[in-house]
Amino acid sequence: MIDYSIQNKKAWEYNAYEFWVKQSGTPDERAKRDLENPKSMLKRYADYFDTCSGVKIANICGSCGKKAVPLAILGAEVTVFDISEDNKKYALEVATAAKVDLNFEVCDILEIDLEKYGNYFDVVFMEGGVLHYFHDIDEFMCIMYSLLKNNGKMICSDFHPFNKISDILNFQQPTMSYFSTEIFEGEMAHAQFFEENIRNQMPKCSYRKYTISEIINSVINSGFTLRKFDEHPAWTNEKIPGEFTIVATKQ
């Protein structure tokens, strides 16, 4: 595992299980909400899936299973790839409570076992801010391409690069030149929800933010055919972009 992945792993395993229980409820409580309306739990991402029944989905950096479990309830065969053992613990407990199967691989995304998972999935899906955890987006996209079967689809939803110059999502991260290639340390996504004394002790993550052109060109150069690019409003101000979604296919 490369050094910055080890650093990010430490951050994502710091009180993570306790945070998910506080934020999303106990696994039983979360499972109950997932079962009541799994499609609504997918939010806008539901529209990007043609069907879920019988579909093999790789959920990249799937965290605590907040999207993986609803997908499994809808009939998908879901494998979560994530760096945190705490995330795995919570996700599998939710899946058990929901009475669905969920495969969870704790690993560095750049070291996924391609002998086992190469050309295996119908869909590769990621959301909630993933790309900035990887310092080489081309290496990342090549792995996404390798995971998919021919005619498979990647659904990549992430933070809009506009946040390089404005903290539009209120993550309290530094802003910089839009064209900066700087690697920097910053708080993990939910650090702001902890009490100050705990927050000050939390390990930092190592980030690299990309421009729109870097992201789109990486998708294309990795062999994907770009099918769709959508921009979505920010959570805190719907007049400016907060997220985007790319849909691309492996031909």
Image: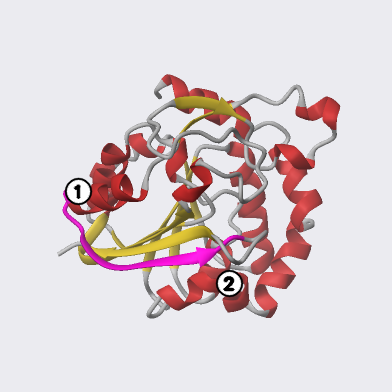
Amino acid at the residue labelled 1: Ser
Q: Is residue 77 left or right of residue 140?
A: right
- Residue at mark 1 to residue at mark 2: CA–CA distance: 28 Å
What secondary structure predominates along the stretch shown in magenta? strand
Residue 212: percent from left, percent from top: 35, 50
- Tell me the residue that label 1 is attached to: 222
Magenta-drawn stretch contains 226: yes
Q: Is residue 25 left or right of residue 56?
A: right
Nearest the viewer among 131 and 143 is: 131
Q: Which residues are magenta?
A: 221-234
Q: Is residue 250 above or below residue 199?
A: below
- The residue under the point 37% across, 71% down is 55
Amino acid at the residue labelled 2: Lys
Magenta-drawn stretch contains 232: yes
- The residue under the point 45% across, 65% down is 231
- The residue under the point 70% across, 26% down is 202
Residue 89: percent from left, percent from top: 64, 45
In the structure shown, which secondary structural element does the residue marked by tag 2 occupy?
helix
Q: Is residue 26 above or below residue 130?
A: below
Q: Is residue 206 above or below residue 219?
A: above
Residue 139: percent from left, percent from top: 27, 37
First in residue order: circle 1 vs circle 2: 2
In the structure shown, which secondary structural element does the residue marked by tag 1 occupy?
loop
Q: Is residue 136 left or right of residue 78?
A: left
Please state, as top left, top right, bottom left or bottom right, where the C terminus lies in the image: bottom left
Please state, as top left, top right, bottom left or bottom right, where the N terminus lies in the image: top left
> Looking at the rendered structure, which numbered label has been put on residue 43?
2
Count of numbered tags: 2
Q: Are marks 1 and 2 in contact (CB under 8 Å)?
A: no
